[in-house]
Amino acid sequence: MNEKQISAIKELLSVPRNIVLVAHKNPDGDAIGSTLAMQHYLTQKGHTATTVLPNDVPEFLQWLPGVETVYKYDKQNKQSKRALDNSEIIFVLDFNAFHRVGEDMQKALESYQGTYIMIDHHQQPDVISDFIYSDTSICSTCQMVYQFIDMLGDIELIDENIATCLYTGIMTDTGSFRFPSTTSTTHKIIGDLIDKGADNAKIHDKVFNTSSYSRLQLMGAALSNLKVLPEFHAAYITLSQEELNSFHYQKGDTEGLVNYGLSIKGIYLAAIFIEDEEQDIIKISLRSKGNFSVNQFSRNHFNGGGHDNAAGGRSNVTLEETVQKFVGLLPRYKEELETSYES
Ligand code: 5GP
Ligand code: MN
């Protein structure tokens, strides 16, 4: 963001406004952390700020400060629509294409006449927005929100609640500060958030140590299903709806499972294919190490996208056919995968 844009936003926020914060469907720690942090920040500045998410917050994030005030567009449709209609500004956080909120909410956003401000770190922004703060090199939208608040000269307004939300989003989007997108700036910001009241050990415990017994059993099933294709430096996991049902699947239970593929020596591309009978799709998560872009791979073959090393997608054929398609694509990427990562 340049000086001119920052001045314009400062001007816009110099009087109390009605503001809505939105993030993508199936919101993750970064999506919820960034919307709630902005909500707390804008409220402190004297604005009326409301978070509207397309659907529910996963259990492991339901303790975040302010989460009880969030409207879910699917279940609290009237309140959500009213909030959008009454708003003068919408902050688009942690996504950059309107289809990421799901069909219903997408229509509402596309017909919105107010001002848009987008803060996001995904590739290829595809949103018409009055203000865009987009940087694909930054690890998380939460880090960008910290930097945004800093650019507006309000770092002193970051209190314990804001610090807790931002810490959570940065932690979850960087795989606990492991991914290459984690920089010294990230660590400096994290240090400051701890100083401002984020309880790092507690946050880690609340996010990661809340599994049910059946979730661990589900992880066991997923790991038993793991297939390794060493010649392509690839590995994948499948989970059928039947398996999900038998382990009493709850939203969020499959979070992070895809990463186990990458923990095998010599594996640079990992995938998980999860059957979703309700939506009648196979939900796909892709992860890579090095310069193999799963964002591009997913855009080309699986109707999705994301980042170079973490992307999602979907398929409309059966689980078996989806796996066949994936395995069938690998020979064409053999050379690229071979040279994608220097260990
Ligand atoms: P996950 O595998 O955790 O669902 O998603 C990994 C990353 O890819 C996240 O940053 C997420 O926002 C992005 N992503 C997931 N699914 C899609 C999709 O269908 N389209 C796009 N453009 N990005 C996605
Ligand atoms: Mn994110």
Image: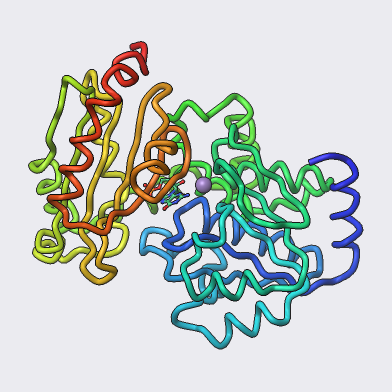
Q: 315 or 188, which lies in front?
A: 315
In the rendered image, residue 13, in percent from the top left (x then y), is placed at: 85, 62
In the rendered image, residue 187, in percent from the top left (x then y), is placed at: 58, 30
**Coloured how?**
rainbow
In the rendered image, residue 341, in percent from the top left (x then y), is placed at: 36, 16
* Image point (53%, 42%), residue name: 170
* Image point (18%, 36%), residue name: 327
Looking at the rendered structure, the number of numbered marks drawn on it comes to: 0
In the rendered image, residue 334, in percent from the top left (x then y), is placed at: 26, 21
* Extreme residue in the bottom direction: 78
Q: 42 or 162, which lies in front?
A: 42
**Quarter-of-image position of residue 336:** top left
Q: Is residue 254 visible?
A: yes
Q: Is residue 308 left or right of residue 12?
A: left
Up-down relation of residue 199 to residue 242 (above or below): above
Quarter of the picture containing the C terminus is: top left
* Image point (63%, 28%), residue name: 185
Q: Is residue 175 visible?
A: no
* Image point (44%, 45%), residue name: 305
**Quarter-of-image position of residue 37:** bottom right
Quarter of the picture containing the N terminus is: top right
Q: Is residue 207 left or right of residue 148?
A: left
Up-down relation of residue 175 to residue 88 (above or below): above
